[in-house]
Amino acid sequence: MNLDYGGILSGEGGSTTLIDPASALALTTLPRASLAETDRAIERAHAAFPAWRAVSPGDRARLLRRFATVVDEHLAELAILEVRNSGHTIGNATWEAGNVRDVLDYYSAAPERQFGRQIPVAGGIDITFYEPLGVVGIIVPWNFPMPIAGWGFGPALAAGNTVVLKPAEVTPLTAIRLAELALEAGIPEGVLTVIPGKGSLVGERFVTHPLVRKVCFTGSTEVGKGVMRGAADQVKAVTLELGGKSANIIFADADLEVAARAAPSAVFDNAGQDCCARSRILVQRSVYDKFMALLEPAVKGFRVRQPADADAEMGPLITAGQLASVSAYVDGADVAFTGSTPGGQGFWYPPTVVIPASAADRIWREEVFGPVVAVLPFGDESEAVAMANDSDFGLSGSIFTSDVGRAIRVARGVEAGNLSVNSHSSVRYWTPFGGFKQSGLGRELGPDAPDAFSEVKNVFIAT
Ligand code: NAD
């Protein structure tokens, strides 16, 4: 793997030793970018911008399609890299690499379709243009290194911007490989640059460097607030995708077997390290005991395996620190039942179901970001909506009911950006994704994503 993008990484910024989460053994050591190296990468992306925006729409589309094809040719390699660096199951990691390909394919159609408007005016013609912003900084967390990178760089590149991208310190390998594949596909030097390094240095520099015109941040609510505060100094655009504490609401009229079978993967997928994890289950009181009896075998049967095993449904947590943090949430809690783990030296934690004393409990309110779900009963529909909304977050959620009217009422009533009925739909790249309240600002994906990486310009031509 070539880490020396145009002389960006000399090692003067120190290094990070990456750990395989499944075995706790060292994987490799990588240099981190220094401040001067970060600045050089940003300046290089700025220098690459005029030529990239001038690439004709058809040619930019063709280059993005070629990038998608090269990613597709390397799916297995990217997936294995993610299994080793992040402990993702091979099934998930393969889907994640495929998601990057699909996002590139989808947004390859955008350069030829980012239409302005012609607005009727007196004395001339009025037209609008979508202009690229310039250099866009993308800051990625460790929980989904490939998809979240692609959700940023796919539409940003399609809209004619150049991109500097900072992966999370502990999971940089797939992002670095994707930048190499971009070059291989013919995307010019400096158009997509991955800069591994510290958030407080590289990420912070994206916020403070005047040549970076937008910061697209995914990560914790706490750091996201700092990014937003910092961006205010230069009135810099931000997109924020932050934390979640999503509700899975199960009504008495639902197919309880379907709801119980679906609940574990909605929260334990990726070992619960998912901003959309349905980590609060709300069950209508009249069916609470029946639902819990159905949930127990589903949780115990959830296959926590070595991540490279083809039938693994869940792997380890990302780091020893994350394991300690998740354990601390559960210590002293009323645990209803748990699943199992393969054990060993890695950062393993079993799927765990807890019963909070009340909705004031920390485990009911805070994002655990591990395979832990809390369950509480509710009385009627209005109480279910009030309980779901009693949260600082509002990212996603699910509603299980056989009453169509109720499904729609509750979906409209829950303050969250992404709801699904009788399912736990994952993120689809062709539909918008983002949070209400402290779960974020702005939307990613869907047909309008390139507009979020553009400025609208209005031009009047006198006739
Ligand atoms: P984090 O906030 O610690 O880090 C996220 C990224 O920001 C990393 O690349 C980090 O290096 C960087 N960073 C850290 N300090 C910075 C600073 N001062 N300035 C700029 N960048 C900085 O989050 P994490 O622990 O990597 O990820 C977990 C969090 O991400 C969870 O809260 C999760 O809910 C959230 N998340 C949200 C979404 C979403 O789409 N809403 C998706 C995935 C993860």
Image (tube, grey):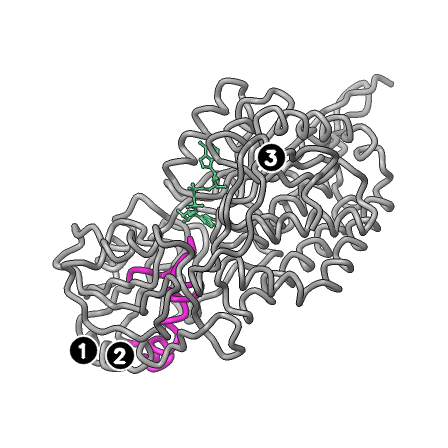
Q: Give the SS element for disc 1.
A: helix
Query: What's the amino acid at mark 3?
Result: Gly
Which quarter of the figure has residue 34? top right
Q: Give the SS element for disc 3.
A: loop
Q: Is residue 263 magenta?
A: yes
- The relative height of residue 96 versus residue 240 in the rendered view (above or below) is below
Q: Residues within 10 Å of mark 3 (few under 14, many from 20)?
A: some
Q: Which residues are magenta?
A: 253-280
Look at discs 2 and 3 and give the one toward the viewer.
3
- Discs 2, 3 touching: Cβ within 8 Å: no
- The relative height of residue 268 versus residue 181 in the rendered view (above or below) is below
Q: Is residue 100 magenta?
A: no
Q: Is residue 140 left or right of residue 212?
A: left
Look at discs 1 and 3 and give the one toward the viewer.
3
Q: Is residue 432 left or right of residue 362?
A: right
Query: What's the amino acid at mark 2?
Result: Glu
Query: What's the amino acid at mark 1?
Result: Asp
Query: Percent from the top left, x then y, of residue 354?
Result: 21, 65
Q: Label 1 belongs to which residue? A: 289
Q: Label 3 belongs to which residue? A: 11
Work out whether residue 63 or residue 89 is closer to the camera in this orientation and state it: 89
Give the CA distance from mark 2 to mark 3: 50 Å
Q: Give the SS element for disc 2.
A: helix
